[in-house]
Amino acid sequence: MQQLGLLKKMLPGLLPIFIFIIADEIWGTEIGLIVAVVIGVLQMLYFAIKERRLEKFVLFDTLLIVGMGGVSIVLHNDVFFKLKPAIIELIMIAFLAFSLFSKHNIMQKMSERYMKGVEFNKEQSMQMNKSLRNLLILLTVHFFLTLYSTFWMSTRAWAFISTALFYILIIGYFGIELLMKYIKNKNTEFLPIVDEEGKLLGKASRAECHLNPELMYPVVRLHVFNSKGEILLQRRSLKSDIEPGKWDSAVAGHVRYGEEIDAALKRESLEEIGIDISEFQLLSKRVFKAKTSTALMFVFIAVTDDIPEANKKEVEEIAFYKLQEIMPLINKGKASMGLEQEFEMLKTIKIK
């Protein structure tokens, strides 16, 4: 995430603080401040020479060390140096607050530019704003802890709160966020995104595919005939996202991400009607457009006298129909759009 990249750039600024803590313990506060300021200047020169440019964050951080360290030495009070982490954190808080509560989400624009112009959809924007809001709360709490430790706690306590505790909280937060994302993705069904030829373009969750007609995903459909020429139909689950309760092809299901078309067809056949299909033929490949989704349909036919068994978790019921009995289902609105569109092709099939 872009937030992590920003936090990584803060790491160089911690070196002078660690040097100050060590020097303060050995030689006292004034020498510690002088050493910290010198380290800050050398650090700035190092980056300038090595990368042949001035890293803006490092420059700002070093100048802040020099300025506040200088004031601390002149006034013989290290509190000004101790305020440095709080000031940087306050700037980050202002930056996050501006992104969240103004019309210009700087963090999102930075992320889009970082990912080469990829635009965030509504769901992704909401998720980013949620992360930024949580991060803002976390930084605000830590900011006040740092202020308190600066004025009313020991140098060692301030050192722990302003540095170690900061990264413990940040790493802990992002660690939990990544863990939650992993758990969510593990339980999420991803579908392949394809073009009209079936070429793989990417992947998206099932929910995203069913809500975005610009994402085309492959599905398999199988029309099963018996030796009498009867066709097996399933009545779609009432819990289905698309056309619940409608009569449809014997097998209809999604192709999972990373799954071959034939493998998906066999899996769906076993899951929905309990038949292990070994021989099948591709009838057509066509694009199916609904109001909220677009599917690339691979339509197959198979002939078998194996006895099917409806999986009640997948379908409401199954039944054999004669072809002439399908038209009344269509006229009464009880057939799926897919079955209606494929009916003319089904009438041309001759069962030997």
Image (cartoon, rainbow, N blue to C red):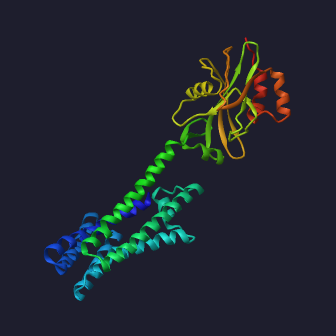
Using the image as rendered, state which of residue 219 and residue 315 is in the foreground: 315
Location of residue 54 in the rendering, given as x and y in whole percent from the top left corner: 32, 70
- Kindly give the residue lying farthest to the left in the view shown: 27
Q: Quadrant of residue 216?
A: top right
Give left or right: position of 183 versus 290. left
Note whether residue 9 is visible: no
Note whether residue 120 is visible: yes
Q: Quadrant of residue 174?
A: bottom left
Using the image as rendered, state which of residue 264 and residue 317 is in the foreground: 317
Location of residue 310 in the rendering, given as x and y in whole percent from the top left corner: 67, 25
Give left or right: position of 178 versus 105. left
Give left or right: position of 131 versus 52. right
Location of residue 173 in the rendering, given as x and y in whole percent from the top left corner: 42, 58
- Kindly give the residue lying farthest to the top in the view shown: 352
Give left or right: position of 243 versus 90. right
Q: Quadrant of residue 63?
A: bottom left
Quadrant including the N terminus: bottom left
The residue located at (80%, 20%) in the rendering is: 322
Quadrant including the C terminus: top right
The residue located at (35%, 73%) in the rendering is: 146
Location of residue 300 in the rendering, given as x and y in whole percent from the top left corner: 66, 25
Q: Where 75 falls versus 37 (above or below)?
A: below
